[in-house]
Amino acid sequence: MLIRCFCDGDLCAFEVLVTKYQRRVAALINASVRNAAVAEELTQEAFLRAYRSLPGFRFESAFSTWLYAIARNLTTSYFRDGQVRAENAIPMDLLTETMSLQENASWEGCVSGPDEHLSGVQLVAGIEQSIANLSPHMRSAFLLRELDDLSYQEIAEQLTMPLNTVRSLIFRARATIGSDIRPLLSKAIPVRSF
């Protein structure tokens, strides 16, 4: 409906589409480039390309699938053109907005001793680092599931992957993150002697 309104000349319809999808597109791009400034630029470029190409949209797929394909192609071009190497990209800070452990839970005093102290900030940093170390496909699938709460089917469509591949990627991402942060969590759990 919004796409048809835009094609009929209603520019506000595109603004609604941007508002609806900007966070998801930015998360998908940031999951790959792991640099907030670059992700912001590529997100703007994705919407600019969508704006220019939308009059030719054929309604053969969902708008979100089409838009995410534009974002994926931009990210692929970004790395292919040698603008940056993935291993040199800085870690993302995307999870801090959704996992504000400092505000929602106090880890202060969970463990005695200054050397064994685990704060919410350290735990979030450990989770972020673990996510940053995932492969780009695994990271994208995981973030679309956990941050955007998309179904496995929606993720498969957006990443143009088979459904079972998406399930496997998310399962492996969760296992990897769990394994990576288990040592941090063991510091947070007080050991009681009986």
Image (cartoon, rainbow, N blue to C red):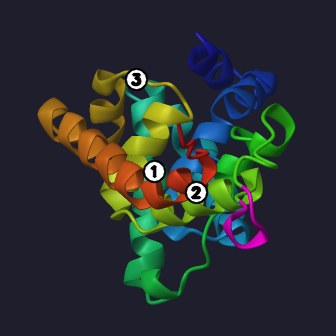
Identify the residue under disc 3.
Answer: 62
Contact check, label 2 and label 3, Cβ < 8 Å: no
Label 3 or label 1, whichever comes before in sequence order: 3
Identify the residue under disc 2.
Answer: 187
Identify the residue under disc 1.
Answer: 70
Q: Is residue 1 visible?
A: yes
Q: Quadrant of residue 65?
A: top left
Relative to 66, does residue 93 appear above or below in the rendering? below
Boundaries of the magenta span: 112-117
Cα separation, mark 2 vs mark 3, equals 46 Å
Magenta run includes residue 114: yes
Left of 52 or right of it: where is 105? Answer: right
Cα separation, mark 3 vs mark 1, equals 13 Å
What residue type is disc 3 on?
Ala
Mark 3: give few (<14), some (14-19) or many (20+) Cα within 10 Å.
few
Q: Looking at the image, which residue is at 35% across and 32% down?
A: 155
Comparing 146 with 46, the one in front is 146
Looking at the picture, how far across and down is residue 76, in whole percent? 39, 68
Cα separation, mark 1 vs mark 2, equals 43 Å
Mark 1: give few (<14), some (14-19) or many (20+) Cα within 10 Å.
some
